[in-house]
Image: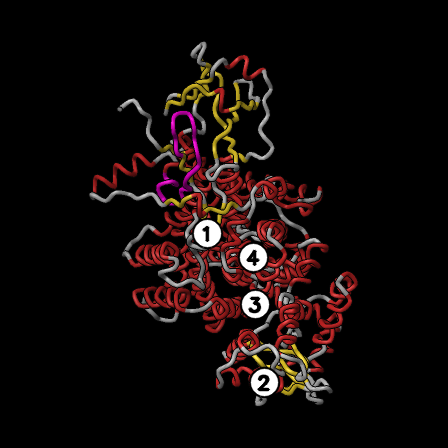
Amino acid sequence: MNFLPKKFIFLYYIINLPVIDSLTGKKVGRVLDLSASLKEMYPKVTGLIMRNKRNQKIYLPWSSVKMLVEEKGIFIENFLAVSKEGFTQNENDILLKETFWDKQIVDIHGSKVVRVNDLHLLREGLNFWVVHMDIGITGLLRRLGVSKIFEFFIKLVSSYEVEDRIISWKYVQPINGPIGADALSLKVHHSKLAELHPADIADILIDLGTEERINILKSMDKITAANTIQELPLKIRLQVAELLDQKLLIEIINEMAIDEAVDLFSQMPVKKMNLLFTKLPPEKVLQISSLLGHANDIAGSIMSTEFICVKQTMTAAEALEKTKKESSRKKESYYIYVLDDNDALVGVVTLQQLLTISAEKIVSEFMRKRIAKVKIKTKIKDVAELFYKYDFTVVPVIDKLSKIQGIITMKDAFESVFHQIRKETEQEQ
Amino acid sequence: MKFWDTLKEKPLIRNLIIFLAVLGPGIVTGSVDNDAGGITTYSVAGAVFGYKLLWTLIPSFIILAVVQEMNARMGIVTGKGLADLIRENFGVKITFFIFLGLVAADIGNTATEFAGVAGSMDIFGISKYLSVPLIAIAVWILVVKGNYKTTERIFLLFSFCLLSYIVSALLAKPDWGQVGAAILKPSMQINKEYLGMVLGIVGTTVAPWMQFYMQSAVIEKRLKIEDYKFVIADVIIGCIATIVVAFFIIVACAATLHHNGIVINEARDAAVSLKPFAGIFASQLFAFGLFVASVFSATILPLATAFYVCEAFGFEAGINKKINEAPQFYALFTFIILVATIIILIPNAPLIAITIWSQIINAMLLPVVIISMIIMVNNKKIMGKYTNNSFQNTVGWSTTAILIIMTIMLIISPLVNYLHKLFFRN
């Protein structure tokens, strides 16, 4: 059993290995990088790039590799014929050293950005798969070529075994560094990121460089992108709006909740805002610009216009039907607001009520008539206090004629007073 | 509120608001630059050569501005720190070399700053065994327990205190005719002492760690490329502030010490010697300036060093993180301060040797850092359309060339001296 090679090998021990022609037994060059295919669950090594003695780069498919002996070299079958063949790397393959060494990746499991020191490959015969990323100090020392000395000293002074800090490929989300960014972003999907909550994605984006941030946002679906942008700090949000290309920015804004879009527009230069307005759907522009007019510390400035309302004369079945139709486009669909013939707000029903009550009942018979509501001019602080005092998550906003104009969710209310409170405490300091 | 909003719409006011928000990185970096080591160099230059060396401040200014502009641009475009970029583009070995040197030099530099604290407090009659540990603890608490906003504000306030040198200089009643003549008609002398001093002045203005600090300060501000012109204004104001302070230190020492033929070795000596000629107030102001500058740099240096090392090697870092979130960062920060404090408190510590060695390491690192910077700032894959234009490259490369020649001279001149003495003494 002893001739079986070790099961795992670090990329460090393959890079710079001599490439040897197995026919002549002579060294023909050195390994520069490995290519790998992303089609399997773990990236499988598909070829190698070597530099020959005349300083030329040559690509060899992995099938030509006959043997890999650590510290000795990679033996190539019939090197002369293979190198003349003029193989090229598959377009969808990535280069392991170039993509990962010294670059940042997202550790999905720990939900943070880390730097890769080395790659851990699983080896079975002549097949190699990338299984782990080494992000620990041992990887760093190995790269510096001093890991053996270091381990020796550690063992000398204590019985402490230095542990590798590695993360499984399952939890690795590559983020394309600036090098060849565009080409790579097509190959590497950011699907693993989508498993995270937008707020966590936002935290990760904060830690990245400008270009990586934009690339990741570009690769996400528009709804996730919109939700993620909402969670970014204002300054970065504006930076992102500046750098995303306009077409994409408009698509993303279109998916944003109205109140968040208003937030973004209110800080944008007027010129840019007007330009974007010409490209957005007219009804969206109307909603946004009407909200933009409100002073920024009253209920009207943070309310969302995405709510569902029904007439009090409808039956439960009709009301449910209307809710079903509209709920996919609305932010909040648990509370359904009831209006009279003059469109004044007279009550509220919950989705639960509509689902459980018999279909032919008229809405006005079972709606709750006493409802908490706020005026457009109510201060946000007072709205937040209302949420704090009572046990509900959404409050409707009405105008002078008692017509419903929007809703405020608890999250939005607390979010905006949080900023105010922070600003006030900072001014006091 | 309404009034404020309409006011904000006026372009001039709007620009002013943006500018004030952007302000900081350049000015703080420029002020840290006038640390204990810088003040010493300027004082000695003024005392030994009078006004003759004032002209060197002009090339110093240009070099400083060119280098910092590149940092600011890289910071805005990439959103990444210089350490990050060097690691990603030049690999682990070069990064390791740079940072090994940086840590070693910065421990030495921090020790020099604490020496500045000890010297200036000595003038107010406070023993170094009291002042140095107290300041070290204060600095540690400010960084570990404080928050970034307050820290930055305290720093900005600090940099205004450096203006006390202007008062010191005015009290020394300099001969403004001579000052003007010295700048307009630079005098060249070809001798060892003169050249050494020129190198010293230019060398003390640009230090490798500054580039890292400047770039991360720019990133911290989350600037957009359209803020670029304000950042440049900030950089230039910072450079002017640095040069103005240096100017007045040289003038103060030239008008009094050189005029009366007094030789000094340390910034502290300058403060003491000012007393009989410019009065006790001028002397104390000078000591106060030295104190502020030393504390300022003693805070920023270890902080900045810990930050880049962690950034380059992938540890969590940042003043807004808690100790258990970023253990390596705080450990390194504490280590640097601790070692520097101990060095100063050991009786008869070889301070001058430490200063010279950290200067030599700095001088060796500087070309490496600047060349990597210019290579990256010209890389389209990193900078997109914001690479250097041919003017910026001409200025950039000639600055680099000058700096490299100077640093080589700075390193070999003590050696040449030594050989000279060895062979020609008999």
> Regarding mark 3 in the picture, which secondary structure is present there?
helix
**Residue, x 40% and y 23% (percent of image)?**
A68
How far is disc 4 from disc 3 in space, using C-alphas?
Answer: 32 Å
Instruction: State the extent of the magenta-drawn residues as a range.
Output: A122-141
Q: Which residue is mark 1?
A: A108
Kindly tell me whether residue B388 is visible in this rendering: yes
Q: Which colour style is shown?
A: secondary structure
Q: Residues within 10 Å of mark 1 (few under 14, many from 20)?
A: many
Question: Is the same chain shared between marks 3 and 1?
Answer: no
- Are the residues tagged 4 and 3 within 8 Å (C-beta)? no
How far is disc 2 from disc 1 in space, using C-alphas?
Answer: 45 Å
Q: Quadrant of the C terminus of chain B?
A: top left
Q: Amino acid at mark 3?
A: Ile
Q: Which mark is residue B166?
A: 3
- Residue A40 placement (x, y as % from top left): 49, 37
Q: Chain of mark 1?
A: A
Question: Is the same chain shared between marks 1 and 4?
Answer: no
Q: Chain of mark 2?
A: A
Q: Earlier in the sequence, mark 4 or mark 3?
A: 3
Q: Amino acid at mark 1?
A: Ile
Q: Which residue is mark 2?
A: A367
Picture layout, residue A33 above or below residue B41: above
Q: Earlier in the sequence, mark 2 or mark 1?
A: 1
Q: Which residue is mark 4?
A: B219
Kindly tell me whether residue B275 is visible in this rendering: no
Nearer to us: label 1 or label 4:
1
- Residue A26 placement (x, y as % from top left): 44, 13
Q: Chain of mark 3?
A: B
Name the quadrant containing residue B389.
Answer: top right
